[in-house]
Amino acid sequence: MAVTFTAESVTAGQPDKLCDLIAEKILDETLKQDPQAYVGCEAAVSGNNVTIMGEITSAAKISYEDVARGAIAQAGYETPGLGFDAQTCGVTTQIREQSEDIARGILRKDPFSSGAGDQGEVFGYACCETADFMPLPITLAHRLARRLEKARREGEIAYLRPDGRAQITMEYTDSRPQRIAAIILSAQHTPWMKTEQLRAELAQKIISKTIGEEWIDDQTQIYINPTGRFVLGGPAAHVGLTGRKQTVDAYGGAVPQSGSLAGKDPSKIHRSAAYAARYLAKNFVAAGLAKRCEIRLAYAMGLADPISLNVECFHTETTKEERLKKFAEELMDLRPAAISERFGLRRPIYEKLSCYGHFGENAAEMPWEQIDLF
């Protein structure tokens, strides 16, 4: 029986993603000056206003306002008079130091005994659907959104504005992708652009140049700006907040989602342990030990070792899941500080990950995406 699965991606100008970019740039700027900083930073945008908030303990000296305005311009909001822009927006900062109650569980003489900076469960996933072991729908959705943004940035399509979204619905049979059932592409545009011309041009220049013909048939439904108009967009139209695109950042909903990644230093397990879980799952699938693999890790604040580790292969494993669990425990130190050292997570590497995913094609050069465990 055929089933469908849907995944979404968005451009850097989408309000939630803009907030992720601001938070990640602040994290990177902090780590450049102080690699041992503790950072939990978020941003919110609404109308022509930005609020930066969070807990940062660091010796770094940074103008959060300047970083935010730079991120806003980088995302494409450079022109005054359109409801939101880098020059005229109001910027409010509410940053304080990390709680001493949290710090006491993290700051220890032996750094590898330092406890997790938060608690919760994280998920890592890999499958055989693409060359980088990601679900095909989220990979294609990211490609569409990235292509849309590239066309705007390079002036190939002059009427585009920064806010954009893409969505792929894939049809599966026996857990294998067969065809695309639906494509949705929504692109913010100038008011003078006629809808039918926009739809024709985006179908030709974005969809046709991004999605292979083998996935589209005469039954595929294609919707481009389905409401007919998308002039008012970005923070002028929608409130944005860091961490609200967790499904976009990870696996497109193929497995449960971890907490927000953006704006967090690697003492936070929702960043470091999520990367470790992906690394394990990807290496297991790449080694032929399973066709699909989900790794779950759970931590308690202030404790270094995970309190649980589970492996789920959805009946695709070629060896027992208990053996894979033992591999994970023996081959990788899963304490947050050890993960951070192994992957070099206290470097300013995060801005690139603020849009188009922390895994797969967008993160191909990152250490947690490498196949080198065995």
Image (tube, grey):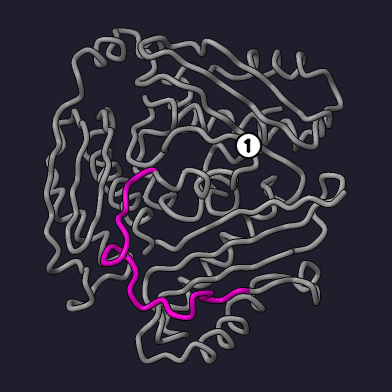
Looking at the image, the residue that sits furthest to the front is 227
Residue that badge 1 annotates: 255
Looking at the picture, how far across and down is residue 364, in whole percent? 57, 49
Q: Is residue 28 left or right of residue 99?
A: right
- Looking at the image, residue 52 sits to the left or right of residue 354; the answer is left
The count of marks equals: 1
Question: In the image, is residue 231 part of the stretch drawn in magenta?
Answer: yes
Q: Nearer the viewer, residue 299 or 323?
A: 299
Determine whether 228 is above or below 70 in the image. below
Instruction: Note whether 208 is above or below 38 in the view shown.
Output: below
Q: Quadrant of the C terminus?
A: top right
Q: Which range is magenta?
A: 223-243
Identify the image quadrant of residue 139. bottom right
Coordinates of residue 39 in the picture (x, y in percent): 27, 32
Chief secondary structure of the magenta span? loop
- Asked if residue 30 lies left or right of residue 180, the reply is left
Q: Position of residue 309 (x, y in %)?
A: 61, 16
Work out whether 222 lies above or below 288: below
| Quarter location, residue 167 | bottom right
x, y (%) of residue 104?
A: 25, 10
> For the point 44% across and 30% down, which residue is it?
270
Kind of residue sitting beneath label 1: Val
| Residue shown at the point (62%, 84%) measured from the top left | 204
Who's the residue at 44% across and 49% down the image?
Answer: 353
> At x 36% / y 11%, what residue is drawn?
302
- Local crowd at mark 1 within 10 Å, few (<14), some, or many (≥20)? some
Of the pair 79 and 111, the residue shown nearer to us? 79
Name the element at disc 1: loop
> In screen coordinates, is 104 left or right of 326?
left
- Residue 321 to residue 256: above or below: above
